[in-house]
Amino acid sequence: MADTEPLLFKVSLGSLRPLNGAAADALKAIADGSMVRIEIKRTQGNLRRMAWYWVMLKIAIDNLEDAFDGPVTSEMLHKWLKREAGLAKPIVSRRTGEIMDYDYDSIAFHNMPENERSSFIDFATRTLSRRLGVHPSELQTAAKEST
């Protein structure tokens, strides 16, 4: 399973209410009156931390727009951070020794033990803060205020 921003909802008065931007965007993409299939899963891990992590990626992308040739998504930035942290396993050609790609699912974000996910998010915060030229607490605060 690829790491993507989860669609988080809360049950309120018998209805599902979006808790994050990805969930709100998913709802907007559904035409009024459409029928959709939803798979209900209990959440695991520190949801607040995971939610502001994905918001932090969006903040970084918005502030680094001119640093990339072409569009960059939260998922792309997440994969880059996993690679930088050494969590993506390289797929190497046996014949040439060349790295062909990376297995980003070798350690799935949603399956990480909470202490490892926390360490990874701390790493991501420091790495993105350096790129943005801000203190990690500033980026963290901005992301938490947006969730």
Image: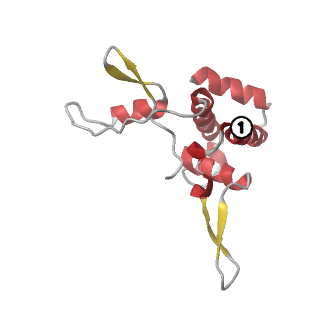
- Name the residue at 67% across, 40% down: 117
Q: Which amino acid does label 1 sit on?
A: Asn
Q: How far from the left and from the top, in percent, is residue 27?
A: 35, 32
Q: How far from the left and from the top, in percent, is residue 76?
A: 58, 51
- Name the residue at 63% across, 44% down: 112
- Give the number of marks: 1
- Name the residue at 63% across, 30% down: 49
Residue in front for this viewpoint, 8 or 34:
8
Up/down of 37 relative to 96, above or below: above
Q: Residue furthest top?
A: 13
Q: Residue furthest bottom?
A: 95
Residue 97 located left or right of residue 71: right
Crowding at dot 1, Cα within 10 Å, few <14 / some 14-19 / many 20+, comes out as few
- Name the residue at 32% across, 20% down: 15
Q: Does residue 73 appear in the picture of this structure?
A: no
Q: How far from the left and from the top, in percent, is residue 89?
A: 66, 62
Residue in front for this viewpoint, 99 or 105:
105
Residue at mark 1: 115
For the C terminus, the quadrant is top right
Up/down of 82 relative to 33, above or below: below
Callout 1 secondary element: helix
Residue in front for this viewpoint, 49 or 71:
49
Q: In which quarter of the image is residue 139?
A: top right
Residue in front for this viewpoint, 107 or 70:
107
Q: How far from the left and from the top, in percent, is residue 66?
A: 64, 46
Q: Quadrant of residue 105?
A: bottom right
Q: Does residue 23 appear in the picture of this structure?
A: yes
**Figure coloring:** secondary structure
Q: Quadrant of residue 28?
A: top left
